[in-house]
Image (cartoon, rainbow, N blue to C red):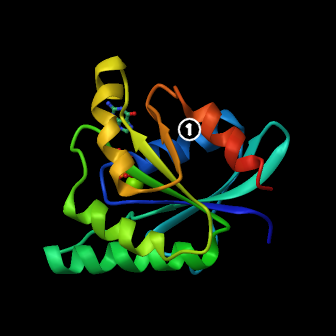
């Protein structure tokens, strides 16, 4: 129950870093929901007095590239069902990869709002490099550094406005 935000994207883009930041700063409780695998982590966050559930996806280990891709697609599909809003995270340091493009294709079919988040935009140079992500064609796009927290406030303001 309640409003749910899921963070999706391929491994290493910084999903768990953002997830932990959302929970930590807002003194949220991390739930150990029984029956839930390590594939997904559930938490509760609070921003400006608005509380919402957050799902961090992708904590799986894959043995091969095929399994890997299949697993990411599965996680994205589950998140598209469970969440009210999707945060699609990419990494400015790698640019758009084939896996990013795959995930983008799935998410474009979602009837739910998708926020494209370009992470690791730690400085001004990276801000310039991040422009290529507009080509993915998402209406909502944010550039942030989950590590430092810069840009996360603007993203959260927009997300909680939907609650
Ligand atoms: P996940 O696999 O998508 O959950 O990614 P993680 O949150 O585990 O992060 C992967 C790596 O990227 C870690 O080494 C993080 O410290 C690093 N990372 C995450 N966010 C940022 C960021 O904003 N800037 C930089 N430079 N590194 C980051
Ligand atoms: Mg992770």
Q: Would you call the spot at circle 1 few (<14 residues within 10 Å), some (14-19), or many (20 or more)?
A: some
Please state, as top left, top right, bottom left or bottom right, where the C terminus lies in the image: bottom right
**Residue 112 point in image, percent of width and height:** 62, 69
Please state, as top left, top right, bottom left or bottom right, where the N terminus lies in the image: bottom right
**Residue 162 point in image, percent of width and height:** 76, 54
Please report the residue visible at 21 percent of the width from the left and 56 percent of the height from the top: 97
Please report the residue visible at 36 percent of the width from the left and 27 percent of the height from the top: 127
Residue 141 relative to residue 82: left or right: left
Q: Can residue 5 be seen in this view?
A: yes
Q: Can residue 34 be seen in this view?
A: no
Please report the residue visible at 34 percent of the width from the left and 72 percent of the height from the top: 72
- With respect to residue 28, does 130 lie above or below? above
Residue 87 relative to residue 112: left or right: left
**Residue 12 point in image, percent of width and height:** 30, 50
Q: Quadrant of residue 54?
A: bottom right
Q: What element carries label 1?
A: helix
59 and 152: which is toward the camera: 152
**Residue 120 point in image, percent of width and height:** 36, 34
Pointer 1 residue: 21
Residue 19 relative to residue 64: left or right: right
Q: In which quarter of the image is residue 131?
A: top left
- With respect to residue 4, does 22 lie above or below? above
Ligand 1: quadrant of the figure: top left
43 and 139: which is toward the camera: 139
Tally of numbered discs: 1
Q: Check the image and name the residue furthest to the left.
A: 64
């Amino acid at each position: 129950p309640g409003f749910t935000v899921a963070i999706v994207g391929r491994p290493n883009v910084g999903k768990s870093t953002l997830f932990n930041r959302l929970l930590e700063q807002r003194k949220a409780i991390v739930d150990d929901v029984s029956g839930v695998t390590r594939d997904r982590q559930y938490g509760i966050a609070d921003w400006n007095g608005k509380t919402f559930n957050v799902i961090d996806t992708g904590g799986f280990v894959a043995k091969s590239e095929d399994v890997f891709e299949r697993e990411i697609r599965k996680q994205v599909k589950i998140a598209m069902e469970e969440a009210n809003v999707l945060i699609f995270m990419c990494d400015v340091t790698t640019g758009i990869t084939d896996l990013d493009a795959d995930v983008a294709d799935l998410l474009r079919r979602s009837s739910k709002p998708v926020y494209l988040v370009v992470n690791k935009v730690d400085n001004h140079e990276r801000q310039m490099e991040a422009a290529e992500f507009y080509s993915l064609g998402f209406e909502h796009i944010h550039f942030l550094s989950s590590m430092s927290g810069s840009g996360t406030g603007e993203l959260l303001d927009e997300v909680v406005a939907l609650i």
